[in-house]
Image (cartoon, rainbow, N blue to C red):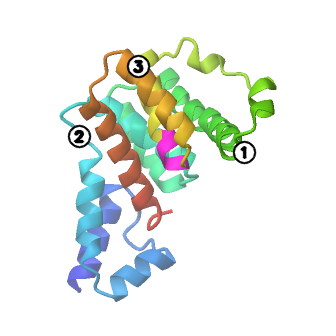
Amino acid sequence: MSESTEIVQELLQSVAVDKDYRTESLTLLEKGESRYLRDLKLNLTSTLTSEHLSTKECALLGLSTAINNNNKPLTIYFTKYAEEQGATAAEIGEAAGCASLLASNNIFYRFRHFTQKEKYTQIPARIRMQLMMKPVTGKEFFELMSLAISAVNGCEMCVNAHEDSLIKLGTTEERIFDAVRIASLVTATGKIIF
Protein backbone atom coordinates (compact mmCIF):
# COMPACT_ATOMS: atom_id res chain seq x y z
CA MET A 1 0.00 0.00 0.00
CA SER A 2 1.38 3.42 -0.98
CA GLU A 3 1.85 6.19 1.58
CA SER A 4 -0.88 8.23 -0.17
CA THR A 5 -3.37 5.36 0.06
CA GLU A 6 -2.51 4.97 3.73
CA ILE A 7 -3.14 8.67 4.39
CA VAL A 8 -6.40 8.54 2.40
CA GLN A 9 -7.59 5.64 4.54
CA GLU A 10 -6.62 7.49 7.74
CA LEU A 11 -8.44 10.61 6.51
CA LEU A 12 -11.56 8.64 5.63
CA GLN A 13 -11.44 6.78 8.94
CA SER A 14 -11.19 10.09 10.82
CA VAL A 15 -14.55 11.18 9.36
CA ALA A 16 -16.11 7.71 9.68
CA VAL A 17 -16.29 7.09 5.93
CA ASP A 18 -15.65 3.65 4.43
CA LYS A 19 -12.00 3.16 3.44
CA ASP A 20 -12.99 2.34 -0.15
CA TYR A 21 -14.92 5.61 -0.60
CA ARG A 22 -13.48 7.80 -3.34
CA THR A 23 -14.38 11.01 -5.09
CA GLU A 24 -12.71 12.08 -8.30
CA SER A 25 -10.72 14.76 -6.45
CA LEU A 26 -9.61 12.33 -3.73
CA THR A 27 -8.53 9.83 -6.40
CA LEU A 28 -6.49 12.52 -8.18
CA LEU A 29 -4.66 13.39 -4.95
CA GLU A 30 -4.08 9.73 -4.16
CA LYS A 31 -2.81 8.80 -7.64
CA GLY A 32 -0.61 11.88 -7.72
CA GLU A 33 0.95 10.91 -4.39
CA SER A 34 0.12 14.46 -3.32
CA ARG A 35 1.81 15.80 -0.21
CA TYR A 36 -1.38 17.82 0.32
CA LEU A 37 -3.16 14.71 1.61
CA ARG A 38 -1.22 14.87 4.87
CA ASP A 39 -2.01 18.60 5.20
CA LEU A 40 -5.68 17.92 4.52
CA LYS A 41 -5.82 15.28 7.23
CA LEU A 42 -4.02 17.48 9.76
CA ASN A 43 -6.11 20.53 8.87
CA LEU A 44 -9.35 18.61 9.36
CA THR A 45 -8.12 17.31 12.71
CA SER A 46 -7.35 20.88 13.75
CA THR A 47 -11.04 21.81 13.31
CA LEU A 48 -11.92 19.66 16.32
CA THR A 49 -10.16 21.77 18.93
CA SER A 50 -9.40 25.41 19.63
CA GLU A 51 -7.86 27.45 22.42
CA HIS A 52 -10.75 29.91 22.08
CA LEU A 53 -13.75 27.68 21.38
CA SER A 54 -15.16 24.70 23.23
CA THR A 55 -15.14 21.33 21.46
CA LYS A 56 -18.94 21.55 21.24
CA GLU A 57 -18.65 24.95 19.55
CA CYS A 58 -16.05 23.56 17.12
CA ALA A 59 -18.39 20.70 16.29
CA LEU A 60 -21.40 23.00 15.75
CA LEU A 61 -19.35 25.33 13.54
CA GLY A 62 -18.16 22.32 11.53
CA LEU A 63 -21.73 21.05 11.25
CA SER A 64 -23.19 24.40 10.16
CA THR A 65 -20.44 24.75 7.55
CA ALA A 66 -20.93 21.20 6.24
CA ILE A 67 -24.68 21.81 5.93
CA ASN A 68 -24.08 25.17 4.25
CA ASN A 69 -21.86 23.38 1.73
CA ASN A 70 -24.37 20.53 1.13
CA ASN A 71 -21.77 18.00 2.23
CA LYS A 72 -23.47 14.80 3.38
CA PRO A 73 -20.45 12.85 4.73
CA LEU A 74 -19.19 15.82 6.76
CA THR A 75 -22.71 16.68 7.94
CA ILE A 76 -23.09 13.14 9.29
CA TYR A 77 -19.63 13.26 10.86
CA PHE A 78 -20.05 16.66 12.56
CA THR A 79 -23.57 15.78 13.75
CA LYS A 80 -22.19 12.74 15.54
CA TYR A 81 -19.22 14.71 16.84
CA ALA A 82 -21.51 17.48 18.14
CA GLU A 83 -23.65 14.89 19.93
CA GLU A 84 -20.54 13.35 21.49
CA GLN A 85 -19.55 16.83 22.72
CA GLY A 86 -22.91 17.28 24.46
CA ALA A 87 -24.81 19.29 21.85
CA THR A 88 -28.56 18.98 22.24
CA ALA A 89 -30.97 18.27 19.38
CA ALA A 90 -32.07 21.93 19.59
CA GLU A 91 -28.46 23.17 19.26
CA ILE A 92 -27.82 20.84 16.33
CA GLY A 93 -31.06 21.99 14.71
CA GLU A 94 -30.01 25.59 15.22
CA ALA A 95 -26.68 24.97 13.46
CA ALA A 96 -28.68 23.64 10.49
CA GLY A 97 -31.09 26.57 10.67
CA CYS A 98 -28.21 29.04 10.76
CA ALA A 99 -26.77 27.61 7.53
CA SER A 100 -30.13 27.91 5.80
CA LEU A 101 -30.95 31.39 7.10
CA LEU A 102 -27.52 32.74 6.23
CA ALA A 103 -27.76 31.31 2.71
CA SER A 104 -30.74 33.59 2.07
CA ASN A 105 -29.31 36.56 3.97
CA ASN A 106 -25.95 36.35 2.25
CA ILE A 107 -27.51 36.32 -1.22
CA PHE A 108 -29.89 39.14 -0.35
CA TYR A 109 -27.34 41.42 1.32
CA ARG A 110 -24.66 40.72 -1.31
CA PHE A 111 -27.19 41.87 -3.90
CA ARG A 112 -27.83 45.08 -1.96
CA HIS A 113 -24.10 45.63 -1.51
CA PHE A 114 -23.19 44.87 -5.13
CA THR A 115 -25.84 47.14 -6.65
CA GLN A 116 -25.19 50.01 -4.23
CA LYS A 117 -28.63 51.46 -5.02
CA GLU A 118 -30.33 53.38 -2.26
CA LYS A 119 -33.74 52.18 -3.47
CA TYR A 120 -32.93 48.56 -2.55
CA THR A 121 -32.03 49.53 1.00
CA GLN A 122 -35.45 51.17 1.39
CA ILE A 123 -37.49 48.14 0.32
CA PRO A 124 -38.24 45.80 3.27
CA ALA A 125 -36.30 42.52 3.12
CA ARG A 126 -39.34 40.45 4.17
CA ILE A 127 -37.06 37.62 5.33
CA ARG A 128 -38.14 36.10 8.66
CA MET A 129 -35.24 35.75 11.06
CA GLN A 130 -36.82 34.68 14.35
CA LEU A 131 -34.01 32.17 14.80
CA MET A 132 -31.63 35.09 15.43
CA MET A 133 -33.78 36.66 18.14
CA LYS A 134 -33.39 34.08 20.93
CA PRO A 135 -30.99 31.38 19.76
CA VAL A 136 -30.65 28.31 21.98
CA THR A 137 -26.88 28.44 21.50
CA GLY A 138 -26.87 32.02 22.78
CA LYS A 139 -26.66 35.32 20.92
CA GLU A 140 -22.84 35.43 20.85
CA PHE A 141 -22.35 31.93 19.47
CA PHE A 142 -25.14 32.30 16.91
CA GLU A 143 -23.45 35.50 15.71
CA LEU A 144 -20.17 33.56 15.51
CA MET A 145 -21.77 30.82 13.37
CA SER A 146 -23.41 33.50 11.24
CA LEU A 147 -20.07 35.22 10.69
CA ALA A 148 -18.35 31.96 9.74
CA ILE A 149 -21.07 31.01 7.25
CA SER A 150 -21.10 34.55 5.82
CA ALA A 151 -17.34 34.30 5.29
CA VAL A 152 -17.75 30.97 3.47
CA ASN A 153 -20.52 32.47 1.33
CA GLY A 154 -18.47 35.57 0.56
CA CYS A 155 -20.84 38.25 1.85
CA GLU A 156 -18.70 41.23 2.84
CA MET A 157 -21.63 43.19 4.23
CA CYS A 158 -22.74 40.29 6.49
CA VAL A 159 -19.18 39.50 7.60
CA ASN A 160 -18.66 43.10 8.66
CA ALA A 161 -22.05 43.33 10.41
CA HIS A 162 -21.59 40.06 12.35
CA GLU A 163 -17.98 40.86 13.26
CA ASP A 164 -19.07 44.27 14.55
CA SER A 165 -21.86 42.67 16.62
CA LEU A 166 -19.42 40.15 18.07
CA ILE A 167 -16.90 42.80 19.07
CA LYS A 168 -19.72 44.76 20.76
CA LEU A 169 -20.71 41.56 22.60
CA GLY A 170 -17.14 41.30 23.93
CA THR A 171 -15.95 38.45 21.70
CA THR A 172 -12.19 38.29 21.23
CA GLU A 173 -10.68 38.57 17.78
CA GLU A 174 -8.93 35.23 18.41
CA ARG A 175 -12.30 33.54 18.91
CA ILE A 176 -13.65 35.13 15.72
CA PHE A 177 -10.51 34.12 13.81
CA ASP A 178 -10.78 30.49 14.97
CA ALA A 179 -14.43 30.25 13.94
CA VAL A 180 -13.59 31.41 10.41
CA ARG A 181 -10.53 29.15 10.31
CA ILE A 182 -12.69 26.13 11.15
CA ALA A 183 -15.26 27.04 8.50
CA SER A 184 -12.51 27.44 5.91
CA LEU A 185 -10.95 24.06 6.71
CA VAL A 186 -14.29 22.23 6.69
CA THR A 187 -14.97 23.83 3.31
CA ALA A 188 -11.55 22.76 2.01
CA THR A 189 -12.11 19.18 3.17
CA GLY A 190 -15.51 19.23 1.47
CA LYS A 191 -13.83 19.80 -1.90
CA ILE A 192 -12.25 16.37 -1.52
CA ILE A 193 -14.79 14.40 0.56
CA PHE A 194 -18.38 15.05 -0.54
Cα distance, mark 2 to mark 1? Answer: 39 Å
Mark sitting earlier along the chain (2/1) = 2
Magenta-colored segment: predominant secondary structure: helix
- Structural crowding at the residue carrying mark 2, measured as other residues with C-alpha within 10 Å and reported as few (<14), some (14–19) or many (≥20): some
Q: Amino acid at mark 1?
A: Thr
Q: Which residue is mark 1?
A: 115
Q: Position of residue 122 (x, y in %)?
A: 78, 24
Task: Give the answer, above or below, for where 140 lies relative to 115.
Answer: above
In the foreground, 142 or 64 = 142
Cα distance, mark 3 to mark 2? Answer: 19 Å
Q: Position of residue 17 (x, y in %)?
A: 41, 60
Residue 126 visible in the current orientation: no
Quadrant in the picture for residue 54:
top left
Q: Which residue is mark 3?
A: 140
Cα distance, mark 1 to mark 3? Answer: 30 Å
Look at the image and give the residue range highlighted in magenta.
Answer: 149-153
Closer to viewer: mark 2 or mark 1:
1
Mark sitting earlier along the chain (1/3) = 1
Q: Amino acid at mark 3?
A: Glu
- Structural crowding at the residue carrying mark 3, measured as other residues with C-alpha within 10 Å and reported as few (<14), some (14–19) or many (≥20): some
In the foreground, 132 or 95 = 132
